[in-house]
Image (cartoon, rainbow, N blue to C red):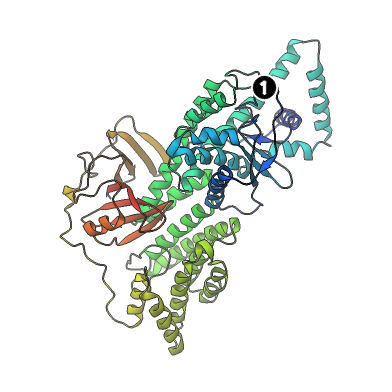
Amino acid sequence: MYMIQKKFQMNKSAFTLLLFSLVGTCLFGQTRSFGEFNMIPKTSSGKSSSKKAIKKGPAYEKAVNVYNRLVQARGDFRYPVPEFAMTADTNTVANIKYGDPVQIFFSERAFEVCEEFGEQSEEAMAFLLGHELTHFYEKHAWRSNFASDNSNLKRSKELASLFSDLDRSTENTKLNQKLLRFDTLSHQFEDAAMEAQADYLGGFLAYSAGYADFDTGHVLIRRLYQAFKIQEENPGYVTLTEREDLGKQSAERMKDLIDVFDMANLLVAIGQYEEAYQFYRTLLIEYQSREVYNNVGTTATLQALNMFSASELKFQYPIQLDLQMANGRGDEVIARNKLLLQAIQHFDAAISLDHDYAPAYINKACALALMGDTLRARFYADVEARKVATGTYAKAVNEIEILVGILDALSETKAGKAKAKARFSAIATKEGGGMAAYNLAKLNNTDSPEIPSPPNAPTAAGEEMIDGLQPFGQRPTASKKIIRIASSLDFIRDTEKAPNASLFRAGKIIMLITNPSYPSKTARGIEIGASREDIEKAYGIAPKRIRAPNGEILAYDDSRAILFILEGSTPKEQKLARWVLYKS
């Protein structure tokens, strides 16, 4: 999240050093791995070990399920996903082998080490496998490929010869020693940088797949050293202590990404779409996935919606959030269309990563419909989205029907309105059919169905507190962490203001967020682990519900100003993980 951008011109000397390093890399081959990369050396036992692929058994099934969740969370299917297999090889932890096909191997011994983490065994596996997948997605083998593909260059041949001469030198001149030392250190430094990136991006990938934040990678690294009987100091490698320090630093950087991602989701939940858009874009600089691209596009679309008047926007569109209407002005048409075009570009990016990603097709169709391009909107909704609305996205069929119903209604024909009525009616009585019921009422020019009120009077804002604090008027302490999101927007995180909570501030928006182990209750008696049903009995049906990585966010605004972050695949399984008090 902290990036320094430098503009420079590569001169001849710099190009020489680059090629020198590339040629050296080529000599090491193209296998990049957590166990073979310079950060954790291969065991020096010298004993032969089986490298036969294992693709069955309880251990394999558990590991491959973790692997598949990570692949789906990344959602990048532009290239064939590496094949996964376990191995009895006791020389390496896990490794990625470049070939046709690309393969990722995970050793049985490493699996056993992960199992030692008990309830966090899957998180430990997700950390290791996410690390390997990051090497693949970030193309960390490009230098070897570049050197191999350009070995016929005159300068490349000369440098290869020079490298070979230095490697065989018996004169041990100071110059030769320095050059060889430079080559060794340059490889170690680059390998360390790629290992650190694989650590924190792999950890974030695991989080986005729904696994708990795993910030003890350095502990896992030490246990792997012990299990594989690797010396703490090895020639040509960083020491174990240095590797652990890198792991700790990567964990902090991973937390920054998680906090930015979480804050973006929370900003969407309270309707701060412009700020959410900036947060998602900041995340995209370091991490690209179909969901993040889709979220950036969605927030741009929601920004544009606030520029429509109520008369222009009669229906609710299936873009996950209830809409907030605002009085539109003529001079906003250009601005909102610009936002919608940006949104479409982001949806296209998500589709380019995964052609079977139904949400991006539906959201693109919504954006096109809002721009008045109903012909293309119908194509992306009724053809493209419907074609991929199967399996994981089977529930998207209802959203498609709602959007096609809106397009039918917008035709302003008697036949079109009849079709729209039939589509809305068929969904309105189903679970989650509130949007269809709303649109049906608008179509029939009747009163819109009201959101059920809480069973008792709303709690006054002053009664809700976290660690005895309210978000209003809170200022971060001197030990705060600041992340620059945009030129006029800083994200401030303070973990010391309250003992069991974090204070987040983005511009004028302040949030108090409980820790997962928060010991107290809300003003209405809700505590960590409460069911969704318990929350809705106490606070009523949430006006907004936002999809989270492994659950949902229930958003209550106005006097309640509270968000509940739930974890669980289905509403019946969802339990309260954290809650948030906010002030904007």
Which of the two residues, 119 or 21, is positioned nearer the viewer here? 119
Badge 1: how crowded within 10 Å, few (<14), some, or many (20+)? few
Please state the horizontal and vertical placement of residue 463, each as a whole percent of the image. Answer: 16, 48
Report the side of 397 relative to 475 (left or right).
Answer: right
Q: Residue at x 33, y 51 (%)?
A: 575
> Residue 441 occupies which quadrant of the picture?
bottom left
Q: Secondary structure at mark 1?
A: loop
In this rendering, the answer to whether 21 lies above or below 468 is above
Which of the two residues, 452 or 294, is positioned nearer the viewer here? 452
Report the side of 195 relative to 165 (left or right).
Answer: left
Q: Residue at x 60, y 27 (%)?
A: 40
- Extreme-bottom residue of the structure: 414
Please state the horizontal and vertical placement of residue 445, each as a whole percent of the image. Answer: 31, 82
Name the residue carrying label 1. Answer: 45
Please state the horizontal and vertical placement of residue 129, each as a whole percent of the image. Answer: 56, 40
Q: Residue at x 55, y 32 (%)?
A: 196
Please state the horizontal and vertical placement of residue 564, each as a whole percent of the image. Answer: 31, 51
At label 1, which amino acid type do we have? Answer: Ser
- Extreme-front residue of the structure: 57
Q: Is residue 154 visible?
A: yes
Report the side of 500 relative to 113 (left or right).
Answer: left
Report the side of 247 relative to 274 (left or right).
Answer: right
In this rendering, the answer to whether 41 lies above or below 78 is above
Which of the two residues, 351 or 202, is positioned nearer the viewer here? 202
How many numbered circles does the render carry?
A: 1
> Residue 148 occupies which quadrant of the picture?
top right
Q: Is residue 315 visible?
A: no
